[in-house]
Image (spheres, rainbow, N blue to C red):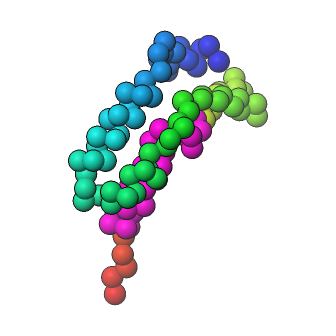
Amino acid sequence: MYEFLQENNIQEINNDPTDKYQKQIQLALQRCKNITEKRAHKYLMNTKPKTPQLNAYIKTHKDNPPIRPVINHTQALSHKLARHLNRKTARVTTPTKHI
């Protein structure tokens, strides 16, 4: 695990930047009136965000077992907003069939 952290330059941070990012997301939502309705802003903000945790799964079936990093973002600050924007852009970017 230590090798994986070193090779990928992953560092532990001393302070939690969640409050700073929450304010930035709130400001961005207020400025982007064409992307979301104002009544959706409250839903798109995660009121009790948690810092995503890094889980490491070791691929035991391989020689010199590599680590597969997995991060659960469902409780992260921007998860709801990212999911909402993904749905909106999918409508535009999904290829259509031409006859």
In-front residue for pair 73/59: 73
The N terminus lies in which quarter of the figure? top right
Q: Quadrant of residue 84?
A: bottom left
Q: Is residue 62 visible?
A: no
Asked whether residue 81 is drawn in magenta, I would say yes
Residue at x 36%, y 75% (from the top left corner): 96
Residue at x 31%, y 47% (from the top left corner): 29
Tell me residue 11's x, y (percent). Answer: 49, 15
In-front residue for pair 10/32: 32
Q: Is residue 67 above or below residue 26?
A: above
Give the side of residue 62 with respect to residue 51, left or right. Answer: right
Q: Is residue 43 above or below residue 78?
A: below
Tell me residue 33's x, y (percent). Answer: 25, 56
Q: Quadrant of residue 48?
A: top right
Magenta part of the chain: 71-94
Give the main secondary structure of the magenta stretch. Answer: helix
Residue at x 70%, y 29% (from the top left corner): 58
Give the side of residue 63 with respect to residue 10, left or right. Answer: right
Q: Is residue 69 above or below residue 8?
A: below
Tell me residue 75's x, y (percent). Answer: 56, 40
- Given the current orientation, which residue lies at the most extreme right position? 61
Tell me residue 22's x, y (percent). Answer: 40, 35
The C terminus lies in which quarter of the figure? bottom left
Residue at x 62%, y 13% (from the top left corner): 2
Number of marks present in the image shown: 0
In-front residue for pair 85/59: 85
In-front residue for pair 3/15: 15
Q: Is residue 88 visible?
A: yes
Give the side of residue 62 with respect to residue 86, left or right. Answer: right
